[in-house]
Image: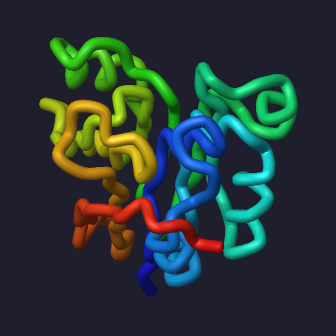
Amino acid sequence: MATRLLLLADTHVPTRARVLPKAVLLAASDADLIVHAGDWVDAAVLDELSALGPVLGVWGNNDGADLRSRLPEVARAEIEGVRIAVVHETGPAVGRETRMDAAFPDTDLLVFGHSHIPWDTVTPRGLRLLNPGSPTDRRRQPACTLMTATLADGGIHDVRRHEVSRAPGR
């Protein structure tokens, strides 16, 4: 069996975009699990994505009490034999792999956000670090982004970064 993941972070609705882009809603509808690494900003985004499928998410530094009361700071799950953790912030890029190896010793995949910068590396211990970027605020990146991946047979497969048009989904 395989589980298709949609990886999101830093949606910042309604501050960076009024609504989720159409590409996000389509990808969410195709996913078996939506993973969101925080900075939703509006709890309505959590509700909208939850209506499309199961969500594994955390709160970020821009999320208020409404989201913090519904989401953990760190989320964990084991899916298809892959131990997943989700957190919003991992600190500076320099030394990230070593810090995350120490902070998440029993994890195979760590999904994080905060920087809006896509990231895909493997730590010395073998922990896969993925930051999908932001589908609504590209900051210094050439495009807004999200990621997809597949979990199967204890492994992380088909990790892809997708550029996202900010065309609204509603």
Q: Which residue is depicted at the point 79% across and 44% down?
A: 43
- 117 with respect to 13 (left or right): left
**Residue 22 against residue 96 in the figure, above or below:** below
Image quadrant where residue 139 sits: top left
Taking the image as drawn, is residue 126 in sight? Answer: no
- 132 with respect to 83 (left or right): left
Q: Which residue is depicted at the point 40% across and 41% down?
A: 137
Image quadrant where residue 55 sits: bottom right
Render colour scheme:
rainbow
**Residue 19 against residue 38 in the figure, above or below:** below
Q: Which residue is depicted at the point 68% across and 64% down?
A: 49
Please state the horizontal and vertical placement of residue 103, each as a whole percent of the image: 41, 19
Please state the horizontal and vertical placement of residue 68, each as a whole percent of the image: 78, 28
Please state the horizontal and vertical placement of residue 13, each as a whole percent of the image: 63, 44
In this view of the protein, which residue sits in the foreground, 17 or 129? 17
Taking the image as drawn, is residue 24 in sight? Answer: yes
- 12 with respect to 156 (left or right): right
